[in-house]
Image (cartoon, rainbow, N blue to C red):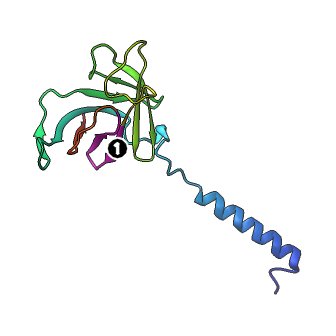
Amino acid sequence: MHLVKNTSEMKKLTCILILVTGFYSCTSDNPSDLENSYLIGKWKLSEAYISAGGPQYLVEIEDGEEIEFFQSGTFNSDRYTECTTGNFSLEHDELRLEYSCNEFNPIAENENGIITYKLETHSNYFALTPTSGPICIEGCSYIYRRK
């Protein structure tokens, strides 16, 4: 019994296998996929790693800021009283926040008007390390826990 009768059928079978393999290997590992984003939901700042010129140490934050991320790519935050809404995006391990209020220019934004952070996700929290605006010379990061 012959499964493949000629070279033409072999080429067709090979093409089909390549297409099927390619289809199944195209899963979305893109962190900018907001529908399935880990960040969607409400979070509260609970701790910070800071330094006063030496090694970093952990400080607990009482009544820390709150931020909520939505699947639409928008967010609400109580960090600034002048502006509480904006858009966010994820690219690899970078979180970008762009506040949507006119004439609002927080010191933490970059030259494009966007606040950027290095994002590290963990099982029950995420950590943000500033990468725009004034950054900590000795390093610092902020821990947010799901509400």
Give the residue drawn at x 46%, y 45%.
31
User: Mark 1 sits on what residue?
Assistant: 119
Q: Nearer the viewer, residue 33 or 147?
A: 33
Quick check: 28 left or right of 38? right
Q: Nearer the viewer, residue 133 or 147?
A: 133
Q: In which quadrant will I find the N terminus?
A: bottom right
> Horizontal and vertical percent for residue 13?
78, 71
Q: Nearer the viewer, residue 143 or 131?
A: 131
**Residue with the most extreme bottom position:** 1
- Give SS at disc 1: strand
Amino acid at dot 1? Leu
Q: Quadrant of residue 96?
A: top left
Give the residue drawn at x 17%, y 39%.
48
Number of numbered discs: 1
- Residue 147 included in the magenta stretch of the image: no
97 over 92 or under it: above or below: above
Q: Nearer the viewer, residue 112 or 61?
A: 112
Quick check: 33 left or right of 55? right
Quick check: 12 left or right of 49? right
41 over 101 or under it: above or below: below
> Horizontal and vertical percent for residue 99?
40, 22
The magenta span reads 117-132
Give the residue drawn at x 36%, y 19%.
105
Quick check: 112 left or right of 25? left
> Horizontal and vertical percent for residue 29?
50, 51
> Horizontal and vertical percent for residue 136?
23, 39
Q: Quadrant of residue 145?
A: top left
Q: Residues within 10 Å of mark 1 (few under 14, many from 20)?
A: many
Q: In which quadrant will I find the C terminus?
A: top left
